[in-house]
Amino acid sequence: MPVRCPTCQSTIPVDDVDLSTRLGKCRGCNSVFELGAQVVTASPAAPLVPPRGYAFETPASGESMYRDDARGKKALVITRRWFRYVALFLLLFCIVWDGFLLTWYVGGLTQGAPFFFQIFPLVHVAVGIGLTYYTASLFLNRSRIELSAEHLNVSHGPLPWPGVKALPLASVRGVKVGPDRRWWMQNRNQAMWAVFVETEAEVKPVVRLLDEDGARFVGTAVARALELPDPA
Ligand SMILES: [Zn+2]
């Protein structure tokens, strides 16, 4: 784009334009002027690098993290590994806990223990099953955040886990990232983050329980796929 002097309208050679200060100088009329809207430096969006535990499920062919769906809109799949180091501690705990219960029942059954001894640890059995399932999920599960032209889908697997949802995207006007207040109220030591979408009527969380880096990454990827501004 040619730059023109706002005073005398002559064309300014590129050597007399300084992009860093956004100033130009005109040798014709000996003036200095601001480039202003004559030169729009579109800062290229920084490429998105998935933080630890997150990944793009890229299409087989493309280098882009986005694939084009049938209608030519951007589609996107992000996976998030559940594994955290606390899983190692929980695994150890489950082995001890479940091992104790197993010993209790094997001992009770082989030695003909009274009925009371068999129902006494039922609460412990329930805790053991729940905790073991949770621990296995931490090792095995991934969340899948899938964006198509119409919906944002969040699902978890391979071990079934609640919290599967599909959000229609037609009404989305913006994407935000911030602390998840609902969780914050319950666990004050642990700030969990969420990605929110803004519609005409409300701002609601769509992906919850993320770390800050993860939430910023997911929010930015979703916003770019929807061609909305990056979340602040
Ligand atoms: Zn001039």
Image (cartoon, grey):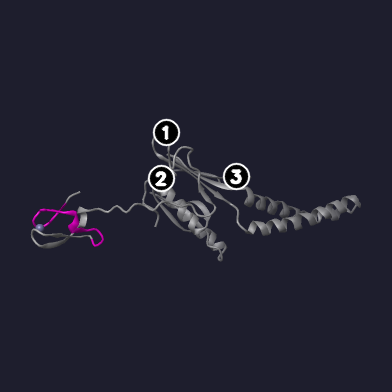
Query: Which residues are the magenta region?
Result: 3-21
Q: Which residue is mark 1?
A: 70
Q: Residue at x 87, y 53 (%)?
A: 108
Mark 3 is surrounded, within 10 Å at the Cα level, by few (under 14), some (14 to 19) or many (20 or more) other residues, namely some
Q: Residue furthest bottom?
A: 189
Image-quarter location of ligand 1 = bottom left
Residue that carries the numbered disc 2 in the rendered image: 225
**Residue 157: assigned label:** 3
Q: Earlier in the sequence, mark 2 or mark 3?
A: 3
Which residue does the image show at 37% across and 46% down from the upper left? 227
How packed is label 2: few (under 14 Cα within 10 Å), some, or many (20 or more)?
Answer: many
The Cα–Cα distance between marks 3 and 1, rounded to whole angstroms, is 26 Å
- Quadrant into which the C terminus falls: bottom left
Mark 2 or mark 1: name the one nearer the start of the chain.
1
One can see residue 204 in this view: no
Q: Is residue 119 left or right of residue 110?
A: left
Residue 199 image offset from top left, x and y in percent: 40, 49
Whether disc 1's CB lies below 8 Å from ligand 1 is answered: no
Q: Amino acid at mark 3?
A: Gly
Neighbourhood count class around disc 1 (C-alpha, 10 Å): few under 14, some 14–19, many 20 upward:
few
Side (left or right) of 121 relative to 18: right
Residue lying farthest front? 15
- Can residue 13 be found in the magenta stretch? yes
Looking at marks 3 and 1 on the same chain, the residue that comes earlier in the sequence is marked by: 1
Q: Is residue 128 left or right of residue 205?
A: right
Q: Residue at x 53, y 59 (%)?
A: 192
How far is mark 2 from mark 1, CA to CA? 15 Å
- Amino acid residing under circle 1: Ala
Q: Amino acid at mark 2?
A: Ala
- The residues tagged by marks 2 and 3 sit, at their Cα atoms, a distance apart of 24 Å
